[in-house]
Image (cartoon, rainbow, N blue to C red):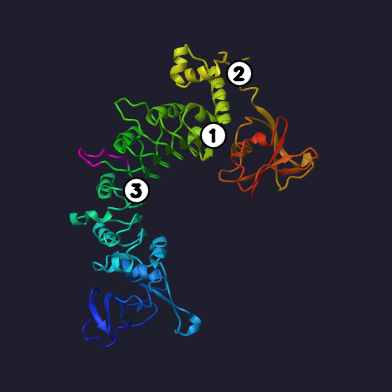
């Protein structure tokens, strides 16, 4: 609205009435590409406004929560059929259910404040999830004033905000029904996060990634028990495994922990009394874990572990991931792939074979270096200890199959054998999943990281047929579904 004929220059925050409509001045100044002084107005009636504070991609002012919500979602309770010229109106049933599924405000107007008490509750009382990420909200007090108006609120995202602590204790009950909270890239310290979480007695899932956390301090004495079951600490600066475990010990219901992309280098044996975590899922992908002893120690810290992600760690660079299966007896899923009974048996036999060929001064030293050795020998029998020699008792040898692997420049591969390049011999367990074979060949042929490939198998008539579904539907199937010793497999790297 251009400023014409005003005797007194207004300032942001001024309330005014015009032609029966009430609004608030949010901006006073020039607008690029125009002349004169302009007013940016936030109307109390959201249907009155023509803009959302942005002109030609530049933001000049921000709005309150309800204005942002109304600006993105249909607010009227009746929809006019366009062909009826306003004569026919259809009632919009269960509008709150629609709002509850699409209450993501981070791609519409910026929110910087709460509306007057009662307004939000009156407009949208049944909203269950709100995303206020990337907004201009300055404090938890304003978040609480919004949340207290949403009695059904269960999910709240506050990513990429910078929030001052809650200063009004009377607003602490605003989050009593919250079960999921996202605080990624808020740069909140761990104590500040705990000060907020303590106000959420039913919180089950917490995300606190990209917050530059360097440590997790233990909860102070008398801190109430927290019901968290899932905690995501992705991409922080956490480097001490023992410190993390001691800080999370009070979280007795915590079963899923994500520590991906943290500078963790090892999982040491604790030198102090500790309480084992009750984790069933742990993500250590893209960390610095590089020693097999860390996997052995993981058994002590997390004896209930069923699912583990380790992709992108130095430990698995050019190594055998199946050894992890043998070292963790409770593991059922590794890097997203289910572990069958047959795969576990093969992994344990492979592990026994490798340990049997290592040199140790005594049996006690072997057992100390490989805590699973004694137990696995009781299950599968003790292989002959003959370092550097193929033992007669090495049961693994009879399980491996020999494949011929080649690289093709085109898809499907050419029929002439001379048209294929880099043919190599490969030994692999028949119980290995197809996903593992593809990754093994990608590494074998030194394909750049991140590339994907198609696998083809040569048939008896000399032609080629796809090895499994290229869309990944067969990735978890064991390769002896298609292959046997002597089979020729061709890899085509997708361009």
Of the numbered discs 2 and 3, the one sitting upstream in the chain is 3
User: Where residue 299 sits in the image (x, y, percent)?
Assistant: 42, 28
From the viewer's perspective, is the residue at label 3 or at label 1 nearer? Answer: 1
Residue that mark 2 sits on: 394
From the viewer's perspective, is the residue at label 2 or at label 3 nearer? Answer: 2
User: Where residue 388 sits in the image (x, y, percent)?
Assistant: 59, 16
From the viewer's perspective, is the residue at label 2 or at label 1 nearer? Answer: 1
In terms of secondary structure, where does tag 1 sit? loop
Of the numbered discs 3 and 1, the one sitting upstream in the chain is 3
Residue that mark 3 sits on: 211
Of the numbered discs 2 and 1, the one sitting upstream in the chain is 1
Question: Which of 371 and 76 lies nearest the eye of the viewer?
Answer: 76
Q: What span is in magenta? A: 214-224
Identify the residue shown where x is 29% and y is 26%.
273
Residue 98 magenta:
no
Question: Which of 428 and 121 lies nearest the eye of the viewer?
Answer: 121
Question: Which of 91 and 292 lies nearest the eye of the viewer?
Answer: 91
């Amino acid at each position: 609205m251009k400023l014409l004929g005003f005797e007194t220059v207004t300032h942001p925050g001024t309330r005014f009435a015009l032609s029966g409509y009430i609004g608030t001045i949010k901006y006073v100044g020039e607008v690029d590409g125009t002349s004169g002084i302009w007013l940016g107005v936030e109307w109390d009636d959201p249907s009155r406004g023509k803009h959302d504070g942005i002109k030609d991609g530049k933001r000049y002012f921000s709005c309150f929560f309800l204005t942002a919500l109304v600006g993105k979602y249909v607010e009227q309770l009746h929809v006019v059929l366009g062909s009826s010229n306003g004569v026919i109106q259809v009632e919009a049933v269960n509008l709150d259910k629609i709002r509850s599924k699409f209450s993501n405000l981070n791609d519409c107007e910026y929110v910087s404040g709460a509306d007057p008490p009662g307004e939000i509750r009156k407009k949208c009382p049944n909203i269950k999830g709100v995303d206020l990420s990337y907004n201009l909200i300055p404090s938890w007090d304003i978040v609480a004033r919004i949340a207290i108006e949403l009695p059904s609120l269960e999910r709240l995202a506050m990513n990429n905000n910078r929030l001052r602590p809650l200063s009004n204790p009377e607003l602490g009950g605003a989050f009593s029904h919250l079960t999921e909270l996202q605080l990624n890239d808020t740069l909140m310290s761990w104590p500040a996060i705990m000060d907020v979480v303590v106000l959420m007695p039913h919180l089950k899932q917490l995300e606190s990634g990209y917050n530059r956390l360097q440590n997790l301090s233990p909860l102070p004495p008398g801190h109430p028990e927290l019901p968290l079951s899932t905690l995501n600490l992705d991409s922080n600066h956490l480097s001490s495994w023992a410190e993390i475990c001691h800080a999370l010990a009070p979280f007795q219901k915590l079963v899923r922990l994500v520590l991906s992309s943290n500078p963790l280098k090892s999982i040491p044996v604790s030198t102090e009394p500790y309480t084992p975590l009750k984790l069933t899922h742990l993500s250590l992908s893209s960390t610095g874990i590089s020693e097999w002893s860390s996997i052995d120690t993981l058994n002590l810290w997390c004896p209930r572990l069923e699912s583990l992600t380790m992709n992108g760690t130095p430990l698995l660079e050019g190594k055998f991931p199946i050894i992890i299966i043998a070292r963790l007896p409770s593991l059922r899923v590794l890097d997203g792939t289910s572990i069958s009974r047959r795969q576990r048996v093969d992994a344990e036999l492979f592990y026994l074979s490798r340990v049997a060929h290592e040199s140790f001064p005594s049996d006690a030293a072997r057992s100390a270096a490989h805590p699973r050795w004694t137990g696995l020998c009781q299950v599968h029998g003790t292989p002959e200890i003959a370092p550097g020699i193929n033992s007669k008792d090495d049961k693994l040898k009879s399980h491996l199959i020999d494949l011929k692997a080649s690289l093709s420049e085109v898809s499907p591969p050419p029929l002439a054998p001379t048209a294929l390049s880099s043919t190599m011999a490969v030994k692999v367990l028949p119980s290995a999943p197809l996903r593992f074979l593809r990754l093994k060949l990608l590494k074998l042929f030194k394909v750049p990281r991140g590339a994907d490939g198609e696998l083809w198998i040569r048939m008896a008539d000399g032609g080629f047929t796809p090895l499994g579904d290229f869309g990944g539907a067969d990735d978890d199937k064991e390769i002896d579904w298609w292959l046997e010793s002597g089979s020729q497999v061709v890899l085509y790297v997708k361009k």
